[in-house]
Amino acid sequence: MSKSRLRIALTFTAALIAAADAPAQDFPAHQITIIVPFPAGGPTDTLARILADHMRTTLGQTLVVQNVTGAGASIGVGRAVQSPPDGYTLSIGNWTSHVGSPAIYKVPWNPLTDLDPVAMLSVSALMIVGKTGLPANDAKELIAWLKANPDQASAATVGAGSGAHICALYFQQKTGTRFQFVPYRGGAPAMQDLLAGQIDLMCAEASQTLAYVRAGKMKAFAVMSKQRWAPLPEVPTMEELGAAGLVISFWHGLWAPKGTPKDVIAKLNDAVAAAFADPVVRKRLSDLGQEIPAREQIMPEALAAFHKSEVEKWWPIIRAANIRVE
């Protein structure tokens, strides 16, 4: 090969390498959108806004939170799936949107194969809470009252297959109780009706209930985790009450459309880790009852493995329950 052709080949190769490196070097060049598939004011929306506030400083660009709701959160996730895989549209979600909903709704996407994991976010417990007007004051009294009044109580769900729905179904199965389900578009409106006494019960994300329980505005009966929840250590686990296996974790993750460059995902993951390392952010999340994973658990690979395990565990259970969309 002549020297001139060799120079051309080397120049072309260098250009290809530069082009491959360009996404991370130039990213982000403009605004990033985080799609929340739930209404404003709920726990996922709150988490997204806390992250966006800090990540805009790390990344040097504005992050906008967009609430796209409906169909058990599947519309919002679908919007992200269909977006260009460039890192400028992200999907934040939880057990409901990325495990429960796609097991029930007929969606043209798969949460494991049509999204690339960016970061594991926070983890919180699920808790059975009730309105202050309920005659029961603890879990044993609640179960006894529900058994004595079958199908009389009402329980909020955030749509078919939501964490609140599956949790309540499991509660019924393990305790031999029956009550009516009332679907809501999100956790925030359901919580408002619970506070107003319009519904009796809800299996809610514990962090969403903390301030209300402490203020005496709702009753906390049991937590759906293996250990008691640190912010409310007086509330027993369902396993302590004899309902073995009634454990459901409520977790959040961040994803990008399938095919997003790995270096862009790495940059986004670093921005999430930087937010979680900030003492101010950590305190805000801790005050909400959210647990922040260790750095290695925040990695995309950790989210991918955990997400896969949750889908493999819960999809057969959800489908066997023959849950129908309201």
Image (cartoon, helix red, strand yellow):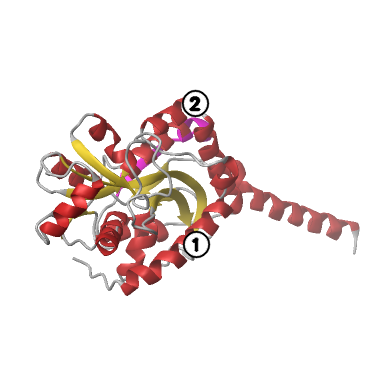
Mark 1 falls on what kind of element? Answer: helix
325 in relation to 278, above or below: below
Which sits in the foreground, 110 or 120? Answer: 120
Where does the magenta region start and end?
A: 55-67
Visible residue check, residue 318: yes
Residue 62: give x, y in percent of width and height.
42, 35
The question of residue 27 being in magenta is answered with: no
Picture coordinates of residue 321 (x, y %)? 29, 71
Q: Quadrant of the C terminus?
A: bottom left
Residue 325: percent from left, percent from top:
22, 67
Quarter location, residue 291: top left
- Please tell me which of labels 1 and 2 falls first in the chain: 2
Residue at (24% x, 34% y) in the render? 213
Q: Which residue is mark 1?
A: 309
Q: Amino acid at mark 2?
A: Pro
The relative height of residue 263 versus residue 173 in the rendered view (above or below) is above
Mark 1 to mark 2: distance in Å? Answer: 31 Å
- The local secondary structure at tag 2 comes to helix
Q: Can residue 155 be seen?
A: no
User: Which residue is located at x 84 percent, y 60 percent?
Assistant: 5
Question: Outermost residue, right direction?
Answer: 2
Residue that sits furthest to the top in the current view: 280
Amino acid type shown at disc 1: Ser
Q: Which residue is mark 2?
A: 279
